[in-house]
Amino acid sequence: MQPGYLSTQMIDDEPRSMTEAAHQNRQGIVALWVGVLKQAIRDFYGVGFVPTFELRSRSIVRFHKDAKAWFESDRTECPSFLWVCEILNLDPAYIRKSVFSGSVNVNFEESTDCQG
């Protein structure tokens, strides 16, 4: 696996007995939590839009601190980092290491895959 690569493909395949509606619902849930993870990574690195320089500098610091605390938390309930990793079947230690080492590319494509 290459650094910075998170994908919904990592999620266990759904059982064949799952109905189409349930499958679509699961994909929607996966897309939601992949989006949360992607936004946390963007916040950690200070990537995003804030209209003015003054607001942007204060927001970047606040967003970074909040994202760092989220990634470092040992909480396991929804919507904690560890819970999101559990839902997405991702290794939290690998994700933390990738984020904190700077090996994640934050220029995500707009899709359900987290590939930088």
Image (cartoon, rainbow, N blue to C red):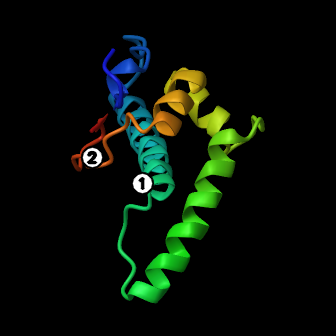
Depth order, front residue of 75/67: 67
Depth order, front residue of 84/61: 61
Which residue sits furthest top?
16
The earlier-in-sequence mark between 1 and 2 is 1
Residue shown at the point (53%, 28%) measured from the top left = 97
Q: Kindly identify which numbered label has been placed on residue 108.
A: 2
User: Callout 2: 10 Å neighbours few (<14), some, many (20+)?
Assistant: some
User: On the picture, is 81 further left or further right than 1?
Assistant: right
Q: Is residue 107 above or below residue 24?
A: below
Q: Name the residue under label 1.
A: 42
Residue shown at the point (46%, 30%) measured from the top left = 98
Q: Of helix, strand and loop, which one carries label 1? A: helix
User: Callout 1: 10 Å neighbours few (<14), some, many (20+)?
Assistant: many
Residue shown at the point (55%, 78%) measured from the top left = 58
Q: Is residue 77 above or below residue 107?
A: above
Q: Is residue 70 above or below residue 98?
A: below
User: On the picture, is 116 further left or further right than 94?
Assistant: left
Q: What residue type is labelled 1?
A: Arg
Q: Where is residue 54 in the image (x, y as percent from the top left)?
A: 46, 88
Considering the image in quadrants, where does the N terminus appear? top left
Q: Position of residue 78 (x, y in %)?
A: 69, 43
Q: Give the alpha-carbon distance from disc 1 to disc 2, as whole Å.
A: 9 Å
Disc 1, disc 2: CB below 8 Å?
Answer: yes
Q: Of helix, strand and loop, which one carries label 2? A: loop
Q: Where is residue 38 in the image (x, y as percent from the top left)?
A: 42, 47
Q: What residue type is labelled 2?
A: Phe
Q: Quadrant of residue 48?
A: bottom left
Depth order, front residue of 31/43: 43
Residue shown at the point (27%, 39%) measured from the top left = 116
Q: In which quarter of the image is residue 61?
A: bottom right
